[in-house]
Amino acid sequence: MSGLHVLRVFCGSGDTGGNLLGVVLGGSAFPGRSERQALAVRFGFSETVFVDDAEEGRVDIYTPGTRLLFAGHPLVGTGWLLRREGLGISCLRPEAGDVPTWQDGEFSWISGRAAWASGRRTWQHPSAAEVEALAVPPVGSGWLYAWAWRDENAGTVRARGFPGRGDGIDEDEATGAAAIVLTDELDRALDIQQGLASQILTRPRPGGVVEIGGRVSPHELRRI
């Protein structure tokens, strides 16, 4: 049977936190979109990636409720996994377009366009404590990225991500696409603490491109 690699992406220091991600390396065993969507529901992660061509970097991304053209933490994690599997891959190819991927020390990086992550609304709060005290917004409120400065001079941010899709994922532990949107809006490098204990690093580049990186850790390998 094809294996499901479960990773934690955007781990904090000391191997804390991280958003769970499912990666099916043998994506060709499940060619139909409806079949893939059903598996994403069954797995229950915020995103699941099906790798259609590992050498070419062709990937297909699903939440429990929909297919995504681009997403941050799935691509950061998948790039790391393919490198660990011995593939010298430098580019991932979701439907949105080519996504460079690389390793820099303990951090796995990608770069993507903020326009690919549209539909996520950012909401600044006066303090990190107010972000931490937020209740989950009602379903249907739209994708909300709540944030506050911890130290504006240092570029450190406290954030929480609420997809609002009604698909069982009430809050994302770590969200690459929303972090890309925030970085593009602020036009500065950020060090984001999201969820319970996750860390996301970002760097803006010209033309609406943002580099985003984090630690990735293997969690388990399951049979499908």
Image: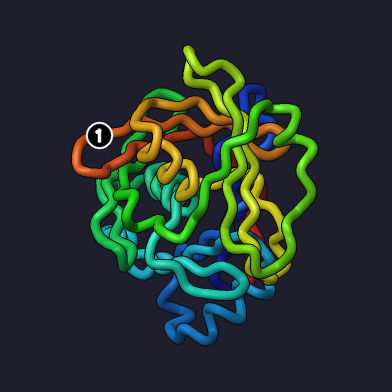
Question: Which residue occupies 31% across, 43% down?
Answer: 111
| Residue sitting nearer the eye, 206 or 23 | 206
Residue 56 image point, x, y percent: 25, 60
| Residue sitting nearer the eye, 155 or 80 | 155
Q: Residues within 10 Å of mark 1 (few under 14, many from 20)?
A: some
Q: Quadrant of residue 94?
A: bottom left
Give the farthest residue toward the front. 126
Q: Report the label total.
A: 1
56 vs 155: above or below: below
Q: Quadrant of residue 150?
A: top right
* Residue type pointed to by label 1: Arg
Question: Which residue occupies 47% across, 73% down?
Answer: 67
Disc 1 designates what residue? 205
Question: Which residue occupies 41% across, 43% down?
Answer: 180
Question: Which residue occupies 28% across, 51% down?
Answer: 99
Residue 96 image point, x, y percent: 30, 64
Residue 16 image point, x, y percent: 69, 31
Q: Quadrant of residue 173?
A: top right
* Image quarter of the N terminus: bottom right
Residue 28 image point, x, y percent: 41, 77
215 vs 169: above or below: above
Tell me the SS state at disc 1.
strand
117 vs 176: above or below: below
| Residue sitting nearer the eye, 3 or 144 | 144
